Amino acid sequence: PKLVVIDLAGEEKEIEAGVGRTVMEVIRDAGFDDMLALCGGCCSCATCHVHIDPAFAAKLPAISADEDDLLDSSDHRDGNSRLSCQLPVTEELDGLRVTLAKPD
Ligand code: FES
């Protein structure tokens, strides 16, 4: 599947995402310096915060209590906020637009 990533400067880039990885990993490995992902994906840092195209919300796993708490610590949370390390890449996500959230 292909994802469209929008960085903090508003630049859009299409990347190829491998099924079985997480959205955080594919964005980080595509060289986006804005994707800090400081905890490496163990749901404890919130620096992988992204805003997801709402059309894809139903194709994503539900938000866990831990993810919800971490997102609450961000000033930039909105109704489309997710932690990208908690989102496995699936074929269904082809065409997903992901906007990197402003850092807190
Ligand atoms: Fe730390 Fe996602 S990488 S919470």
Image (cartoon, grey):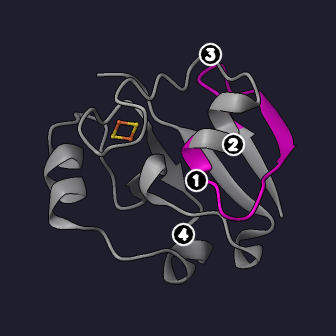
Task: Classify mark 1: helix, strand or loop.
Answer: loop
Residue placed under numbered mark 4 in the picture:
54
Q: Are marks 4 and 1 in contact (CB under 8 Å)?
A: no
Q: Residue at x 43, y 26 (%)?
A: 102
Give, as a three-letter code, the residue at label 1. Answer: Thr
Task: Give whichever of 25, 74 is nearer the camera.
Answer: 25
User: Which of the two marks, 3 or 4, is nearer to us in this view?
Assistant: 3
Residue placed under numbered mark 1 in the picture:
22
Residue placed under numbered mark 2 in the picture:
26
Q: Which residues are magenta?
A: 6-24
How many C-alpha atoms fall within 10 Å of the one at disc 1: few (<14), some, or many (≥20)? some
Q: Does residue 2 lie above or below 32 as drawn?
A: below
Q: Are marks 1 and 2 in contact (CB under 8 Å)?
A: yes
The C terminus sits in image quarter: top left
Give, as a three-letter code, the residue at label 4. Answer: Pro
The CA distance from mark 1 to mark 2 is 6 Å
Dot placed on the residue nearer the N-terminal end, 4 or 1: 1
Where residue 44 appears, as percent x and y from the top left, is 23, 38
Task: Give whichever of 43, 99 is nearer the camera.
Answer: 43
Is 67 on the left-hand or right-hand side of 16? left
The CA distance from mark 3 to mark 4 is 24 Å
Dot placed on the residue nearer the N-terminal end, 3 or 4: 3
